[in-house]
Image (cartoon, rainbow, N blue to C red):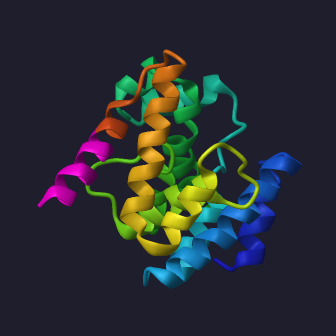
Amino acid sequence: MERNKALEIVAKQLTEKRYKHTLGVTETAIQLAERYHVDKKKAELAAIFHDYAKFRPLEEMKKIIIEQNYDARLLKYNPELWHAPVGAYLVEHEAGIQDIEILNAIRYHTSGRRNMTSLEKVIYIADYIEPGRQFLGVEEARNLAEKDLNEALLFAVRNTIVFLMNKNQPVYPDTFELYNDIVIKKER
């Protein structure tokens, strides 16, 4: 699918603010893909569609999670996680994207997972550091992303876990598994 067609499809699903965020994620993903030798076209499409389901009604997302037999634990955690797996499903069925690498990059861009592919890491990090993001530590994350994708990923997932813990919110198990996976591989 060509970029303009993808953006046209996505624009109908997002607010103006979220569309601007998507453009930032897309440009960041392309830059990271170039730096880390990841397929730029796949990174571009995954980034464009990463928030496709962001504004779908919670009941619709819940129904898809149940009907598609997605991890039932999702329903016990913050619904903010739901738009990623639901988005992958909807992108496949509504936008016709069949590439499993693109769909998985969308599916895991919020929770992460153990053994993430380079494309999945690029989308996770691009979403975290895109130019519109403003939070304590974002500049450090951007600097790390210029040097080492795995170090940037470790920084981002660690910050996310600490952020959730400081708010007394539960951390989805895949996110802990991502953290542990990076640390264990780093020690080898």
Start and end of the magenta stretch?
Answer: 177-188
**Which secondary structure type mostly characterizes the magenta part of the structure?**
helix
Residue drawn where x is 40% and y is 47% of the image? 112
Q: Position of residue 118 (x, y in %)?
A: 38, 69
User: Residue 57 sits in which quadrant?
Assistant: top right
- In the rendered view, tell whether residue 131 sits above or below residue 168: below
Residue drawn where x is 53% and y is 24% of the image? 78
Residue drawn where x is 36% and y is 25% of the image? 72
Total tally of numbered discs in the picture: 0
Where's the C terminus, which quadrant? bottom left
User: Residue 6 sits in which quadrant?
Assistant: bottom right
Q: Is residue 39 visible?
A: no
Magenta segment: does it hold 184?
yes
Q: Position of residue 83 (x, y in %)?
A: 58, 39
Q: Position of residue 2 (x, y in %)?
A: 69, 80
Q: Nearer the viewer, residue 168 or 12?
A: 168
Q: Is residue 106 left or right of residue 148?
A: right
Where's the N terminus, which quadrant? bottom right
- In the rendered view, tell whether residue 51 sits above or below residue 58: below
Judged from this view, the residue extending furthest toward the right is 16
Residue drawn where x is 55% and y is 66% of the image? 143
